[in-house]
Amino acid sequence: MLERISRYLATAIVDAAPGKTQSKNVLEYYIKVTLNFFAVVVLSVLVGVGCNIAPETITALSSFVLLRMFSGGYHVKSLDACVLITTCIIVGIPLLSEYVQVESSVVTAVAAGLVLLFSPRNVQSTIKPRAYPWLKVISLVIVCSNLGINSPIIAMTFMVQALLLIPKGGEITK
């Protein structure tokens, strides 16, 4: 559905101002990214409000997005599936934290190890490989910040995002 909406909007923009816009493919890509982001945010917050865990959901969402911006991670092929899976992860973490007690520092340390080994992974193609060491350092600093914050929700969120960095073959990044 998001793909069709993006295609429709990109076509409408190009048709409304021929020769004055980016190519249809470029516009469609950026519309897809934007719609995907807003769909995840809106759906996650709505479900969080409905489940009476809005602050915790926003904490998980913010932590996930911040780390993912720098570390990258696994992508599903369908935008609709991405929205559903990401929303389930974001809302599932606060719901799970009500029933599962985690030692924040241990989970954060394991997530930091995974980030150190596997980030960055599947980052935007516009980022040059020479920037990858900086992305790794920034990702590691983000994860290690929870050693001071000591939030179980942030620890679990960072762990899930770190798990999404592990490639099928398990090869370590440079």
Image (spheres, rainbow, N blue to C red):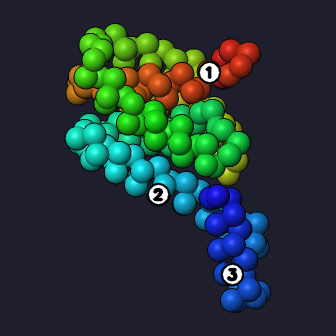
Mark before the other along the chain sequence, 2 or 1: 2
Q: Secondary structure at mark 2?
A: helix
Q: Earlier in the sequence, mark 1 or mark 3?
A: 3
**Mark 3 Cα within 10 Å, few/some/many (few <14, many 20+)?**
few
Please name the amino acid that badge 2 sits on: Phe
**How dense is the environment of label 2, judged by Cα within 10 Å: few (below 14), some, or many (20 and up)?**
few
Relative to 94, 23 lies left or right? right
76 vs 42, left or right, is: right
Q: Is residue 15 visible?
A: yes
Please identify the quarter of the rendering in which residue 163 is found: top right
Distance in Å between CA atoms under marks 1 and 3: 39 Å
Return the residue found at the far bottom: 17
| Residue bearing the label numbered 3 | 12
Direction from residue 55 to residue 136 in the image, left or right:
right
Mark 1 — residue? 166
| SS for dot 1 | loop
